[in-house]
Amino acid sequence: MSYAVSAALQAAVYQSLASDSDLASLVGAAVHDQMPAGPVAGTYVSLGPEDVRDLSDQTHRGAEHSFSVSVVSDEAGFQTAKSVAGRITDILVDSMPVLTRGRVVSLRFISARARRVRAGQTRRIDLSFRAIVEDT
């Protein structure tokens, strides 16, 4: 198994989201790999947890990365959060990120969970993706 591609995948996902002008029009520069200290207002994107499973065989090292990207918004209703979540899905699925180590073989949207949090004051959508990577 190779977990070595994990950092490259995370960096590429972050860069893909942070550099997208359409997403920036919705959240500004509020795409976070590490959350800033203190409360964050407005709508923002945060990279979330990751689970990795070995997919290596006798000739290739690879892994399946299941990871989350979250959209959090204090806007009333889910419309803003859903617009952001839709754009994130388009960015990640329509153009596979280029990695500094290894390569993405496939990247798919798996599921989404939308809910109210913090006594209903905040909307949160957790998007789940699955990336198959090969360590080259």
Image (cartoon, rainbow, N blue to C red):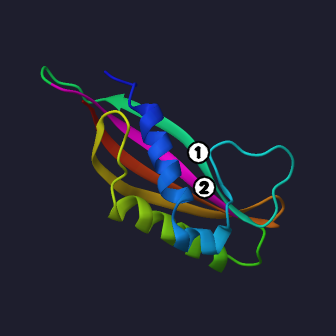
Disc assigned to residue 40: none
| Residue occupying the point 81% across, 56% down | 40
Q: Looking at the image, which residue sits at the far left? A: 59
Q: Amino acid at mark 1?
A: Gly
x and y percent of residue 96 in the render? 33, 54
x and y percent of residue 20 in the render? 51, 65
Q: Is residue 27 left or right of residue 7?
A: right
The foreground one among 1 and 20 is 20
The foreground one among 76 and 61 is 61
| Residue occupying the point 13% across, 20% down | 58
How many other residues sit within 10 Å of disc 2, few (<14), some (14-19) or many (≥20)? many
Is label 1 in contact with label 2 (beta carbons under 8 Å)? yes
Image position of 80 with respect to 20: above or below: below
Q: Quadrant of residue 78?
A: bottom right
Let me know if residue 63 is in the magenta part.
yes
Query: Which residue, given by chain and number where applicable, does mark 1 sit on?
Result: 48
| Residue occupying the point 57% across, 76% down | 83
How many other residues sit within 10 Å of disc 1, few (<14), some (14-19) or many (≥20)? some
Q: Quadrant of the C terminus?
A: top left
Q: Helix, strand or loop at disc 2?
A: strand
Q: Helix, strand or loop at disc 1?
A: strand
CA–CA distance in space, label 1 to label 2: 7 Å
Disc assigned to residue 70: 2
x and y percent of residue 39 in the render? 85, 52
Let me know if residue 44 is in the magenta part.
no
Q: Is residue 41 left or right of residue 31?
A: right
Q: Main secondary structure of the magenta part?
A: strand
Q: Quadrant of the N terminus?
A: top left
| Residue occupying the point 53% across, 60% down | 19
Q: Which residues are magenta?
A: 60-72
The foreground one among 128 and 2 is 2
